[in-house]
Image (spheres, grey):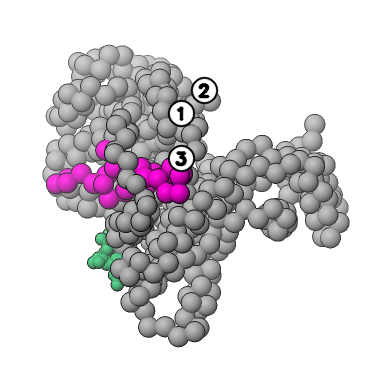
Amino acid sequence: MPKPVVAIVGRPNVGKSTIFNRIVGERISIVEDIPGVTRDRIYSSGEWLNIDFNIIDTGGIEIGDEPLLVQMREQADLAIAEADVIIFMVNGREGITSADEEVAKILFRSKKPVVLAVNKIDNFEMQQDIYEFYSLGFGDPYPISGSHGLGLGDMLDEVVKSFNEPEEQEEDDDTIRFSLIGRPNVGKSSLTNSILGVENRVIVSDIPGTTRDAVDTPFTSDGKDYVVIDTAGMRKRGKVYESTEKYSVLRALRAIERSDVVLVVINGEEGIIEQDKKIAGYAHEAGRAVIIIVNKWDAIEKDEKTMKEFEKNLRSHFQFLDYAPILYVSAKTTQRVKTIVPMIDTVAENHAMRVPTNLLNDVIMDAVAMNPTPTSNTKRLKINYMSQVAVKPPTFVVFVNDPELLHFSYKRYLENSIRKAFGFVGTPIRIIARKKS
Ligand code: GDP
Ligand code: GDP
């Protein structure tokens, strides 16, 4: 089920990014050593009352040097297009400005649920400053303070209340949803067409009621159902924000979110560029199955070493994706395009694989016997038991004497042992340490 999306809209300096960061909290990232992946976020996930949602800070998307009012309109449009609920943030110390009124008008017309948050209400005495904001027409204003973390609970209660009842659709069937992500011009559209063009793939008509304006193309192949999520189809023409890099990242993120399998497409002609890593990093963090597709393989001068060298280079750039298979294809000549869907099947299967607990524990105990657990400050890590608690991605809880003792390198060793025993090609694996009670 796609998570609901919340967008924060408001003038510069009202405190949007402060609140965004508070809601998102400190998330520990496995790919934190990749520049640009975790910094500078405009899109992340949050949770309130056990409900997960995604959140966008529209202020983080530069909209060129347009005048403030134009930028505010663009931001509001973006929020309306992307979000289920909008947090409209104003500054309680400055009162209502004409830009606030402009945003209010646009949001009001959209009929999307809007939660009005009056920020910088840092103490109780200031509460009276919120009353003038009733005139914006969004009901009760919620006083909050980003600096002091006040009022956020009440505001989030209201946000969560405004989520629609989840639509019962998609999911739970055997349909495999996948998307092609990558920089502009790497060949995503060409590949999509090439995949769909293969004989015997029957394109089913567009699914009605798919969220917002993503263009999903369902098709069947060998009796199995697939949906390819077209990120390019999410473009909204004529909008300024559409051309900004951050918006295209946002679009890719939305597609990743809705996919089981993500095809990270790279232009073989150009090699790997920083932005490729950033995009791939998101797919990894989101826990999706991943295949790396090197496209335009026809355009490269090759000898017998080329593929090996390319792979070596790729692996060194994408260490965090060491589980992802690599396919070298050409959308133009259709070379090896036929291998893509079977590979999607394989990684999707692994993404959803469950291993029996007894076999899992045999593997872990063997691994520990081969390579004893580490000690720190004379205390030794003791592993009692491991259990797979989830799929998509496969997630394991390991019960130990002290979770602090399970360091990255030993966790990595356990992960590799699990992979060696069970495969799991193409899917990330998560291992969570818990104290044995
Ligand atoms: P954005 O441009 O809307 O994303 O605003 P920022 O989050 O960057 O915040 C703008 C400024 O307002 C920063 O200097 C923040 O420290 C400050 N600020 C944010 N929230 C509060 C608040 O609740 N109270 C006060 N007094 N200042 C705040
Ligand atoms: P997108 O922006 O990632 O969707 O990329 P497109 O599918 O629009 O392709 C960008 C350009 O690369 C177009 O001019 C394509 O004709 C070209 N292209 C795509 N795939 C290949 C390929 O496999 N080989 C070669 N030589 N060119 C390709």
Q: Is residue 220 magenta?
A: yes
Tell me the number on the disc at residue 49: 2
Q: In the rendered image of this protein, does residue 115 appear above or below residue 295?
A: above
* Front residue of this view, candidates 223 and 248: 223
The quarter of the displayed image where residue 223 is located: top left
Q: Which residue is mark 3?
A: 175
> Marks 1 and 3: which is nearer the front?
3
- Residue 138 screen position, x and y as percent: 25, 17
- Label 3 packing within 10 angstroms: few (<14), some (14-19), many (20+): some
Q: Is residue 224 magenta?
A: yes
* Front residue of this view, candidates 265 and 403: 265
Q: Which residue is mark 1?
A: 149
- Residue 222 screen position, x and y as percent: 45, 49
Q: In the rendered image of this protein, does residue 210 appear above or below residue 138?
A: below
- Label 2 packing within 10 angstroms: few (<14), some (14-19), many (20+): few
Which sits earlier in the primary sequence, circle 1 or circle 3?
Answer: 1
Q: Is residue 74 left or right of residue 42?
A: left
Bounds of the magenta span? 213-239
Label 2 beta carbon less than 8 Å to ligand 1: no
- Residue 158 screen position, x and y as percent: 39, 18
- Label 1 packing within 10 angstroms: few (<14), some (14-19), many (20+): some
Amino acid at circle 2:
Leu
Element at badge 3? loop
Q: Is residue 432 left or right of residue 211?
A: right
The quarter of the displayed image where residue 77 is located: top left
Element at badge 1? loop
Tell me the quarter of the image containing the C terminus: top right
